[in-house]
Image (cartoon, rainbow, N blue to C red):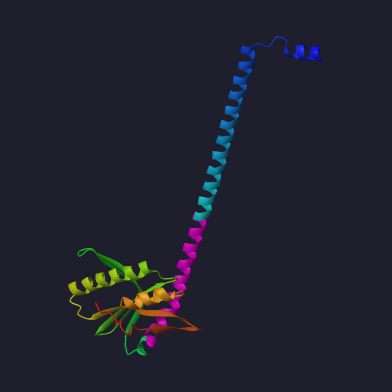
Amino acid sequence: MEQQTEAIGAGLTFEKVWAAIQANGEYLKETERQMKERYEETVRLIRERQEETDRQLNKRFGEFSNRFGEIIESMVVPNLVAKFRELGFEFTKAGPDVVIKDKENNIFTEIDAFLENGDKVMLVEIKTKPTTDDVDEHIERMEKMRRYADVRNDNRKYLGAIAGAVMSESLRVYALKKGFYVIEPSGETFNITAPGGKYRPREW
């Protein structure tokens, strides 16, 4: 045993042992660096694939929302006149997708449904699932339409409504609080709720 130990240790010096330790350390560092690079590359690829998947899902959801919005418009608009008549409005004209492009006065906007008579105009914003931002944007749309009406000497009162296939109670209250009529599904048809109580329909 002693002879074997001596044979194994024969020729070893401190310098050789130290060099071997250093070489092993460099090998470990290089191995760690390569593993880190592979890990980072794997993470990058996973993120890229996830981002691509998210983009595809967002695109498909957007397309679905657009189509669903078109379906809602085609179903809601033809019946709006009758439903608003129940609330005392006699609109003589109604149409979808009204686009305003007034370059001279810098007024640009779009209305999903436009109902009118000689005294009043109802502008309806239709969303699959309305948000508070949609309500706030509709307020801006109403203000634009008021300016557009003024430059055309249109003195009729402008009112607004928010229609949604899915509407939370908080959003419903928010829209009513802002003075909008709320249009939402009810069985095979839809109901229109007018701002009431401490809230009043807002006119522009």
Q: Position of residue 143 (x, y in %)?
A: 25, 71
Q: Residue at x 50, y 51 (%)?
A: 51
The quarter in which the N terminus is drawn is top right
* Figure quadrant of residue 134: bottom left
* Foreground of the two, 137 or 67: 137
* Foreground of the two, 2 or 179: 2
Q: Residue at x 50, y 84 (%)?
A: 188
Q: Examine the structure image and report whether residue 23 is included in the region drawn in magenta.
A: no
Q: Position of residue 77 (x, y in %)?
A: 40, 79
Magenta segment's dominant SS is: helix
* Figure quadrant of residue 137: bottom left
Q: Position of residue 129 (x, y in %)?
A: 44, 70
Question: Is residue 141 depicted above or below 27 in this figure?
Answer: below
Q: Residue at x 39, y 83 (%)?
A: 192
Q: Is residue 182 left or right of residue 39?
A: left
Q: Examine the structure image and report whether residue 66 is included in the region drawn in magenta.
A: yes
The quarter in which the C terminus is drawn is bottom left
The residue positioned farthest toward the right in the image shown: 1
Q: Is residue 12 left or right of residue 83?
A: right
The residue positioned farthest toward the front in the image shown: 2
Q: Residue at x 22, y 74 (%)?
A: 149
- The span picked out in magenta is 55-83
Task: Please count the marks in the image.
Answer: 0
Q: Position of residue 107 (x, y in %)?
A: 24, 66
Question: Is residue 70 depicted above or below 24 in this figure?
Answer: below
